[in-house]
Image (cartoon, rainbow, N blue to C red):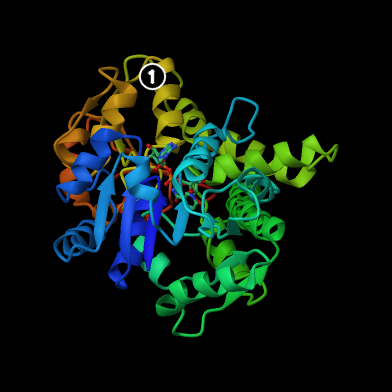
Amino acid sequence: MKICVMGTGYVGLVTAVCFADTGNEVTGYDIDRGKIEMLKRGEVPIYEPYLKEMLIRNLQLKRIFFTTDPEEALKDKEVVFIAVGTPSKKDGSPDLRHFWSAVREIKRFSRAGTIVVVKSTVPVGTSDMVQKKLGRNFKILSNPEFLKEGNAIEDFMRPDRVIIGGDDEKAIEVLRTLHLPYVRTGNPIIVMDRRSAEMTKYASNAMLAMRVSFINEIANICEKLGADVESVRKGVGSDKRIGARYLFPGTGYGGSCFPKDVQGLIAMAESKGYKPLLIKAIEEVNKRQKEILIKKAEAHFKNLKGKRFCIWGLSFKPNTDDMREAPSITVINGLLKKGAVITAYDPVAMENAKKIFKNKISFGNDMYSAAEGAEAVFLITEWQEFRLPDFKKLRRIMRTPVIFDGRNIYDPKELKKEGFIYYGIGRLA
Ligand code: NAD
């Protein structure tokens, strides 16, 4: 099948590469020249496991192409995926500028009969508006994406489910066929109307974000009452009705999706005069949680002025270099504001972090050099390489042995034995 994917960011690139891998001819289109030039050379602008290998393979097999020319990208394509960014505006509602500009390009260059698949996360009713703008000659489907950064290829190739929103049977069949190689183990393709498909995406992300905020709130209450959230979450999560995933206490959620989509859902509800009490609380709990390590540091050190701190992990989660809404930004800015001096280390996100912090912080070559002379280490992102540090070495090189474990990955008892003062989230000291 001849496919165009508009937008070669996270979602667009993974979509393009995965569909090329099953034998389709895919053209990735983006307005960002630098990105397209890199992709043509087989270089991947983001860090995502397996993506580069798959890109190179499909470039060599001449199944994937890249262009900044909308006419070349859209001409003679049977299916066009819109996967451009839909970031938040100041009021929390999604900014659809890029989205509508992509729709205009489709109107100009795509042939009648083209199937237009909305993969970007867009407010409920947007795909219906696309149908109105493009007219009956185009077949519009909603196909929200549920991949997780850091595990994106695996998620695309083995999705829990594929959601297709639309009413054109032939178009639905084409999209179903494209996904068949990825649902061979019986994971369902669920067909519904376009608005429900769009809403499913917002509801899924709000639910996941709610679990994170829920366990963070429970952790904070545990701390006040002398209970250990690590035991509590295991006890709660082993109830089959609840499940253990997305119940890990920490420094709050970040990334390009949860914050934006929770805010988007609030904005949609409020635009219709509905007050979404629960969804608003998810956001508020998360904002407070991002500050929690700063509060713990202040309680321990009293005055943070001139204190040297080390940060382990900058990306919003492991296995990605994505810094969007990363809790590390809140923690670092908060500590800087109180006069602390920061050295940070992250296995892949330092280049992106340098763009955000400029010369306000310094960076270590590895996890130990960043901790040299530090009065505390703050573990913010639980990359594998941070899980089993050489605590003896760490103790030797740090000025004072204090650890703020923002993801509860260390054993408080073991750290105590090694001579550290340990602070986790909602744990017994
Ligand atoms: P991104 O910011 O990484 O990439 C968006 C890309 O679109 C950029 O490369 C940009 O240059 C390009 N673009 C902008 N305007 C364009 C135009 N008119 N034509 C062609 N390209 C254009 O975004 P992303 O993280 O891939 O997200 C894309 C969409 O998918 C968003 O709606 C997002 O909410 C949703 N989504 C993201 C994830 C995720 O984990 N990142 C997961 C599920 C859904």
> Do we see residue 72 in this rendering?
yes
What crowding class fits label 1: few (fewer than 14 Cα within 10 Å), some (14-19), or many (20 or more)? some
| Residue 279 screen position, x and y as percent | 71, 45
Foreground pick, 171 / 10:
171
Foreground pick, 38 / 275:
38
| Residue 96 screen position, x and y as percent | 57, 35
Foreground pick, 111 / 51:
111
| Residue 397 position (above or below residue 183) | above
Q: Residue at x 21, y 29 (%)?
A: 363
Q: Residue at x 49, y 45 (%)?
A: 106
Left or right: 31 with respect to 359?
A: right
> Do we see residue 160 in this rendering?
no
Quadrant holding ligand 1? Answer: top left
Foreground pick, 267 / 118:
118
| The N terminus sits in image quarter | bottom left
Amino acid type, label 1 = Leu
Q: Which element type, helix, strand or loop, lies under badge 1?
A: helix
Left or right: 295 with respect to 6?
A: right
Residue designated by label 1 = 336
| Residue 418 screen position, x and y as percent | 27, 50
| Residue 393 position (above or below residue 307) | below
| Residue 196 screen position, x and y as percent | 71, 59
Left or right: 132 with respect to 147?
A: right
Q: Residue at x 17, y 64 (%)?
A: 57
| Residue 351 position (above or below residue 186) | above
